[in-house]
């Protein structure tokens, strides 16, 4: 049973990493009349599907979720460096937006790294620690970077939601330029799977300790020097 406990606790903790990378954690809603026009005149299968799903009318809103892996690919494909801006004003706006977001993205990246470190530390502790209360303490510590991650993401979303920064400012791409504004940008409900996994490790540890036979509990307390 002890081996089963260790394996399950470690797996629960390590699931945090793919959840952080590949779950659709970022929810967004973008509205633009230009998008509606593009969907109407386009002959692609995707446009036909969108129109069919929207009751026969061309949609003017995109409401979807993206994983951070998807976002990284999109940024790599569409991002510019400001050198292709049509004029000095556009280039200046690009640099200003980058400067404004740089520290916020660094904070988000550090928070994400801390979540990964906490997940790995929880898994390692579950495997090697003789006292599984340490597993609960480390898993509880994993909740802290989750809170930091949420706040860091909100600071990134704020200038987009206020209209201070637009997608067209950051991306030298025609489709991005069609986006009039971002109406919603927040973490989806899937994000809460990550702290839930840390809590699941804690709950699993409590359940395991509760179901231990009395003689095993006494033996463990004796081993840890907790008996008088």
Image: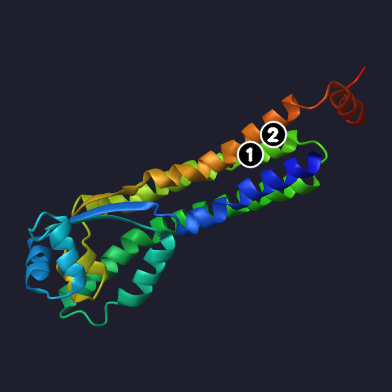
Colouring chosen for the image of the structure: rainbow
Camera-side residue of 213 and 102: 213
Report the front residue among 115 and 97. 115
Residue at 58% in and 41% down: 198
Task: Quadrant for the C terminus, please.
Answer: top right
Which residue is the site of mark 1?
A: 201
Q: Position of residue 210 (x, y in %)?
A: 73, 25
Where's the N terminus, which quadrant? top right
**Residue 36 rendering spot, x and y as whole percentages:** 9, 63
Residue 187's disc number: none
Q: Front-most of 35 and 176? A: 35
216 is higher (above) or lower (below) than 101: above
Q: Which residue is mark 2?
A: 205
Image height check: is 209 above or below 228?
below
User: Along the horizontal axis of the image, is 13 left or right of 217?
Assistant: left
Marks 1 and 2 sit apart, C-alpha to C-alpha, by 6 Å
| Residue 224 figure quarter | top right
Residue depicted at x 83% and y 39%: 130
Q: Looking at the rendering, which quadrant does residue 200 occupy?
A: top right
The image shows residue 181, relative to residue 46, as above or below, that is above
Whether residue 181 can be seen here: no
| Residue at 19 percent of width and 72 percent of height | 45
Q: Residue at x 40, y 67 (%)?
A: 72
Residue 44, image x, y percentages: 17, 75
């Amino acid at each position: 049973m002890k081996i089963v406990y260790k394996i399950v606790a470690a797996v629960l903790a390590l699931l945090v990493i793919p959840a952080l990378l590949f779950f659709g954690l970022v929810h967004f809603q973008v509205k633009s009349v230009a998008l509606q026009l593009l969907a109407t005149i386009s002959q692609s299968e995707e446009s036909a599907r969108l129109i069919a799903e929207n009751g026969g009318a061309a949609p003017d809103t995109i409401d979807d979720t993206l994983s951070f892996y998807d976002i990284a690919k999109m940024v790599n494909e569409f991002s510019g460096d400001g050198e292709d801006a049509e004029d000095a004003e556009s280039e200046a706006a690009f640099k200003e937006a980058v400067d404004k977001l740089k520290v916020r993205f660094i904070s988000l990246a550090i928070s994400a790294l801390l979540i990964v470190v906490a997940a790995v530390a929880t898994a390692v502790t579950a495997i090697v620690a003789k006292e599984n209360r340490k597993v609960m303490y480390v898993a509880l510590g994993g909740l802290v970077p989750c809170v930091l991650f949420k706040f860091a993401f909100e600071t990134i979303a704020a200038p987009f939601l206020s209209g201070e920064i637009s997608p067209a400012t950051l991306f030298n791409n025609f489709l991005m330029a069609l986006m009039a504004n971002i109406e919603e940008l927040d973490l989806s409900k899937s994000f809460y799977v990550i702290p839930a996994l840390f809590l699941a490790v804690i709950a699993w540890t409590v359940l395991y300790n509760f179901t231990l036979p009395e003689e095993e509990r006494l033996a463990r307390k004796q081993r840890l020097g907790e008996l008088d």
